[in-house]
Image (tube, rainbow, N blue to C red):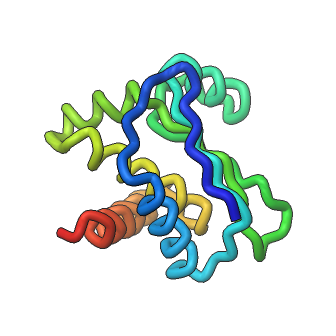
Amino acid sequence: MAINFIAHEVKIRLKERTKLKAFLKDLFKREDRRLKGLHYVFCSDEYLLKINQEFLQHDTYTDIVTFELSENPDITEGEIYISIDRVLENAREFGVTEEYELHRVIFHGALHLCGYRDKSKQEEILMREKEDENLRLYFGH
């Protein structure tokens, strides 16, 4: 199972990639999901806006867009696009480090692939709880 991190026309400092890949594999195991492949693409606001418009018909900036690529419901394979511009702005807005916010969004995408949604208020609360749980496990606090 491959986990890839790709920077598309942006610079990104992603520390401890090996640790992060192992943690993501464990996240899917904890959620009882079989992971085939996971591809993170870090990009700009403008690039992600085009994806959002073209594939989701949403004309808004967002920090993340997640695509499930597997047609088999028992196997998870996904592509996750993350706007580094949004991550940096959100880190400032929420008063957290850029590293912390980046990992929150990375885990958010993985959780979407595990079946978690965030459209309703109740779904959003559960998603935040799962993000916080994974951040605590990853960072140890």
The count of marks equals 0
Residue under the point 76% across and 71% down: 75
Give the position of the N terminus as an image quadrant.
Answer: bottom right
Kindly indicate the quadrant of the structure image that contains residue 25.
bottom right
In this view, the residue farthest toward the left is 95
Query: In which quarter of the view is residue 63 placed?
Result: top left
Q: Position of residue 130 (x, y in %)?
A: 38, 68
The vertical placement of 107 against 53, above or below, is below
Between residue 3 and residue 32, name the one nearer to us.
Answer: 3
Residue 129 image position (x, y, % from top left): 33, 68
- Residue at 77% in and 76% down: 74
Nearer to me, 107 or 73: 107
Q: Quadrant of residue 19?
A: bottom left
* Residue under the point 45% across and 52% down: 17
9 relative position to 15: left or right: right
Kindly tell me whether residue 129 is visible in this rendering: no
- Residue at the image position 41 percent from the left and 32 percent from the top: 12
* Residue 7 visible in the shown view: yes
- The image quadrant where one finds the C terminus is bottom left
The image position of residue 111, as x and y in percent, is 51, 63
